[in-house]
Image (cartoon, helix red, strand yellow):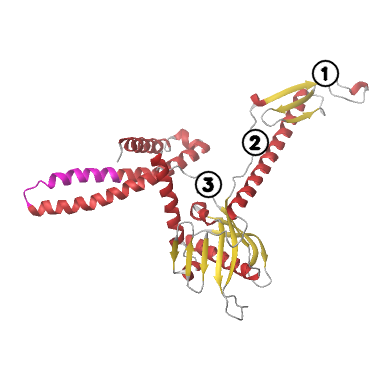
Amino acid sequence: MKAELIQKLTALTKRHQEVGKLLSTPTILQDQNQFKNLSKEYAELSPIARCFEEYQTLEQTLITTEELLKDPDEAIAKLAEEEKTTAKIREKALEHELQLLLLPKDPDDAKNIYLEIRAGTGGNEAAIFAGDLYRMYARHAERSGWKIEVVSEARSEAGGYKEIILRVIGKNVYSQLKFESGGHRVQRVPVTEAQGRIHTSTCTIAVLPEAEEIDDITINPTELKVDTFRASGAGGQHVNVTDSAVRITHLPTGLVVECQDERSQHKNRSRALSLLQARLLDAKRKEQKAKRASERRILIGSGERSERIRTYNFPQNRITDHRIGLTLYQLQDILEGHLEPLITPIIQEAQAEELSSIGKG
């Protein structure tokens, strides 16, 4: 393994030990936010630390084995050779595992998801296929220990769904299902087909990580321009003769709010800040909603037959993932929720591409 990689792993292992000690200190235990952040960091570093510890132990074993290979006793030397062969195989596996563990994490991987299934080209048969896909993912979720909530559904008169949207809740759901987005094509003989002809229909799937709740907006005082002015009124004794009205401009966004209802400049400023915060929060939510809509359009395509990531061929019991050229003859098992033979290879392919790009860099 490269020296710089060893150095990085050593530093991460040291940090893992430091965080472990910090988590047991009274001051950290009393600070819930810091305790939560450190606990998360400790959990993320633990797999790396364990794997690197095994790797270091293995390296010591290989050093000992090299010495035993020089033993004059042929039986001992032979056993040492066998142990060395086994250790070398494990060493290579651990090196690959450590490289994967060091890949930049997708911040959405641990999130719950919204899984959207929509019937595409093919009329009633497409809706029936949407129902098949829903049951497939529901069974896979059950097998994985995840929970499913139906957010909305539009049933088809012929059976199945024109559209069904699910919330899938569980550990690392997005990391497992994020590559399911796109066009899914089915080839089979519909039950209504009298001539026995194979029809092709499609569904589109979008997998969206659940957005974190936007509970609050923090306003940086240095990004505000505050102007005071004399409040306007109908005249008489209640007209304000001081600069109590407040106008606040949020420089990054250009949003302007003002308040002159109160006679106190302090109260007007407080109200204006509250209004500004509410408007910034609303803008943030709208931006988040627009981003999700944009992601959805990118993920699912148009739903045309030619746009597909996967084909489900019933007459041949065949399923093909066109992105990685994977073909399996176990369609019925997969429809029962056994998605691992499809999911694992495409995750591995994505990891291999990422490792390759890092290597080139």
Task: Give, as a three-letter code, the residue at label 3.
Answer: Asp
Of marks 1 and 2, the one in the foreground: 2
Residue 217: give its label: 2
The number of discs equals 3
Which is closer to the viewer, label 3 or label 1? 3
Of the 4 image quadrants, the one containing the C terminus is top left
Q: Position of residue 276 (x, y in %)?
A: 72, 33
Q: Position of residue 112 (x, y in %)?
A: 55, 52
Position of residue 94 measured from the top left corner of the image (x, y, whole percent): 32, 48
Left-right relation of 239 to 266: right
Residue found 31% across the figure and 50% down from its top:
93
**C-alpha separation, residue under disc 3 versus residue under disc 1:** 52 Å
Q: List the residue tagged with mark 1.
A: 242
Q: Earlier in the sequence, mark 1 or mark 2?
A: 2
Circle 2 sits in a helix, a strand or a loop, which is it?
loop
Q: Residue at x 47, y 37 (%)?
A: 29
Residue type marked 2? Ile
The crowding category of the residue bearing disc 3, from other C-alpha atoms within 10 Å (few below 14, some 14 to 19, many at least 20), is some
Residue position marked by numbered label 3 in the rendering: 108
Q: For the magenta stretch, what is the residue range?
A: 54-73
